[in-house]
Image (cartoon, rainbow, N blue to C red):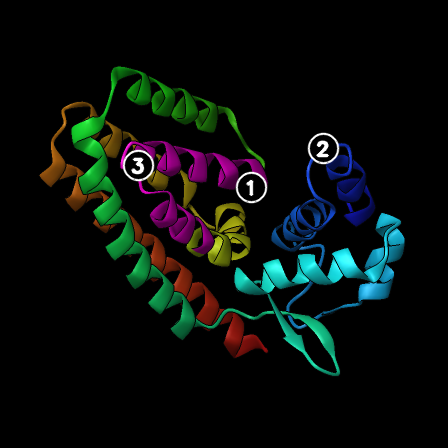
Amino acid sequence: MNLNDLAANVLQQQRSTPDLIADALREAILRGIFQEGQSLRQDEIATQFGVSRIPVREALKQLEAEGLVTLHLNRGAILSVLTATEAQEICEIRSALEVKAMQLAIPKFRETDIEKAAVILSATDQATDAGVLAKLNWEFHATLYATAERPRLLTMIKTLHVNCDRYVRVQMAQMDYQERSQKEHYQLLDACRKRDTKAAVRLLKRHIDIAGQQLIAYLQQIAQKR
């Protein structure tokens, strides 16, 4: 799949043009279609989507807010590079925010929430594509946090996931990451099913910390090769 395919897919949806373009560019970045430090030329993107540069500019502003691109006055949009230090900070913030979301959510869990999370884990067991696995991973966590009824908090957490997503997809493909992550997901779901907030928080924090340590080590290796 390339940017043209992604553009064709999202333009069929009933949403604003900048949002649709942002969706396609975001997925292209997460799939590795664009490379670190690569320039995203507004005129070329506008041509591919058959639009003016205005909605492209708005889409790029969305991606800048998510930390995926950096806008420069004379160079345009450049695909951001995540450093090990930045990844460490992101994981530290994730841990604090997601633990809070979990603490707020567990008392409000319904059986349908647990069942929905279980279905997502079952689908994850069958998936092999790194992009699909990453999306299911977010859906699982988002399902657990949804009953906290804190939409701003959930938006902040999702942005942090997106910041790391493209690198986590590579981790899934290259390392024995998915099997252990899935095991931890099932343990977390079991604690949620029992409404055991203390155990759920402990498992979630460890899950984020271990994933963060692996991501930091991976980014350090990449930096050494540059």
> Closer to the observer: label 1 or label 2?
2
- Name the residue located 44 percent from the left edge and 26 percent from the top edge: 125
Of labels 1 and 3, the one closer to you: 3
Q: Secondary structure at mark 2?
A: loop
Can I make out residue 191 in this image?
A: no
Q: Which mark is residue 130?
A: 1
Could you classify mark 3 by the number of other residues whose Cα lies within 10 Å: few (under 14), some (14-19), or many (20 or more)? few
* Helix, strand or loop at mark 1: helix
Q: Earlier in the sequence, mark 1 or mark 3?
A: 1
Q: Is residue 67 magenta?
A: no
Q: Residue at x 11, y 31 (%)?
A: 196
Q: Is residue 10 left or right of residue 213?
A: right
Q: Position of residue 150 (x, y in %)?
A: 31, 42
Per the model, the C-alpha gap separating discs 2 and 3 is 27 Å
Structural distance between the alpha carbons of marks 1 and 3: 29 Å
The residue at which mark 2 appears reads as: 13
Q: Position of residue 159 (x, y in %)?
A: 46, 54
- Nearer to us in this view, 99 or 211: 99
- Badge 1 amino acid: Ala
Query: Dot 1 surroundings within 10 Å: few (below 14), some, or many (20 or more)?
Result: some
Q: Is residue 34 above or below residue 111?
A: below
Image coordinates of residue 76 in percent, x first then y, are: 73, 74
